[in-house]
Image (cartoon, grey):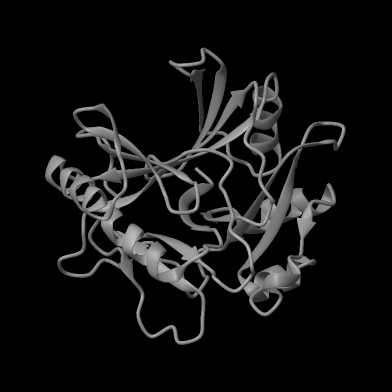
Amino acid sequence: MPLLLIEHLNMSVSDEKVSLDFYSALGCVLVTGRVNKTMHVNCGGMTQFHLPNDEGRTDLWKGDIELGYGSSEAHAESISKLVTLGYKPTTVDANCSSVVGPDGNVFILKFDPAATTLNVEGAKRLAAGSPDSWIQNIVVEVPVGSSPKISKFYNDVLLMADQKSGLCPRTKLPFISVMSSYGQALRFQESETPKQTNDHEHCAIYISDFEATFDEAAKRGLVFVNERFRHIDWASTKEEALECNQFRLINIVDEDGCTIVKVEHEIRNTSHPGCPLPVKA
């Protein structure tokens, strides 16, 4: 399973204090010691949100962001904290709620007893007393009819064959979910009116077959260097990707090379110094 982990989402925010209060209510914990750097918050032991506030803009994700909770108590505590801050969570069912964040992103907060917790022994960011929450699923809204093409892209280019498909219960439109080793899903949901964004947001993932995946992306001309992050990674060749332990792509394309949707992926090797995955004995 090449997709090991959906590790972080990066979205610019309008107000750091307001955002920190919101994400803390969700169960996230501020990463301290990052003076004059982008605010990072841990969401459990292996996932994060990166929340820059120096771009003069805010970023929307192209769909819902679903957080998992390890207990009904942890879920209820987050709901209570959000209400105290003045947010208005909507109850979906006893163990699932939705809430709109301070910059307009929609978060689904869910306790599922059958879900696989990401807060496993050895997770490198797991601290004593950390709330039992994590990034479970991220949704990308895409045009009607595009999900089979996206499925093929992830299978052929990113070598991610572990996928699930189905119909949205509400809209009856198809989706495909690219699954991680920990049961997370990068879900592409067809929509009559897909959410439009400025394409500055991105997700970071860890994969197992780093070099082969780079080769597939490179031969299609899909490797992308984001000038905003050139101080972190500048990879346009395999040698540079191995030096940086990561590379990027932004265009999800069909067989003819035409862009279906833009979703920037920060694709990391497990040798990346920030890798939070437990070390295998």
Where does residue 162 sit, x and y in percent of width and height?
51, 33
Residue most toward the right? 256
What is the quadrant of residue 193 in the picture?
top right
Where does residue 181 sit, x and y in percent of width and height?
41, 44
Q: Residue at x 79, y 67 (%)?
A: 237
Q: Residue at x 50, y 85 (%)?
A: 36
**How many numbered dots are placed on residues in this image?**
0
Q: Is residue 204 left or right of residue 234?
A: left
Q: In front: 171, or 185?
A: 171
Position above or below: 201 against 55: above
Q: Is residue 246 left or right of residue 206?
A: right
Do we see residue 124 in this rendering?
no
Residue most toward the top? 172
Q: In front: 130, or 118?
A: 130
Where does residue 213 sit, x and y in percent of width and height?
67, 51
Q: Residue at x 54, y 69 (%)?
A: 52
Q: Residue at x 38, y 85 (%)?
A: 33
Locate the C terminus and report the quarter of the image it occupies.
bottom left
Do we see residue 267 in this rendering?
yes
